[in-house]
Amino acid sequence: MKNIIKNSLGEIQISKEVIAIIAGNAAMECYGLVGMASRKMSDGITELLGRENLGKGVEVKISEDMLTIDLYIVVQYGTKIHEVAHNVIEKVDFVLKKTLGFSPDKINVIVHGVRTK
């Protein structure tokens, strides 16, 4: 599996929650990002998550040989959405590679909303 690191002494297994929190914190450092959104949207209303719940705005999928991360975000009005999304992807990839020693195979950014103020 992608989240297991093996060495001569044994193996290290990294949980999905840890990967989600690291990815959420990395994404929050990007310019133009207001915050992470809840994965569940009810009646077209998006809930903005606080710093302590960033993992709820990130979905981590692990299969035998593939790690996919879905980030649900809210962007600031007046910013280029594709630039913000690109910056989020680059930042999350860099931080995960630096912190965990491996990078995800795919990072998807889902924009749930635009905040005006």
Image (tube, helix red, strand yellow):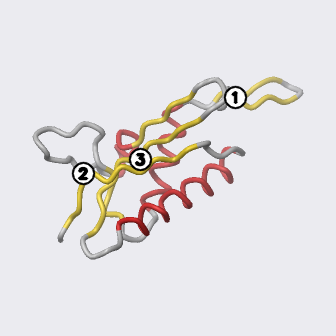
Residue corresponding to mark 3: 71
Residue on which the image places disc 2: 48
Spatial separation of the CA atoms under disc 1 and disc 2: 32 Å
Seen at 50% across and 48% down, the residue is: 23
Q: Amino acid at mark 1?
A: Ile
**Which residue extends farthest right?**
8
Taking the image as shown, residue 62 lies to the left or right of residue 56, namely right
In the picture of the structure, the residue carrying the numbered disc 1 is: 4
Q: Nearer the viewer, mark 1 or mark 3?
A: 3
- Secondary structure, mark 2, is loop
Query: How many residues crowd mark 1 within 10 Å: few (<14), some (14–19), many (20+)?
Result: few
Residue nearest the observer in this picture, 94 or 80: 80
What's the mark number on residue 55? none
Q: x and y percent of residue 69 in the render?
A: 50, 41
Identify the residue at the far left of this view: 43
Q: Amino acid at mark 2?
A: Leu
Q: Residues within 10 Å of mark 2 (few under 14, many from 20)?
A: some
Residue 16, placed above or below residue 71? above
Query: Going 36% across and 51% down the picture, which residue do you hit?
Result: 51
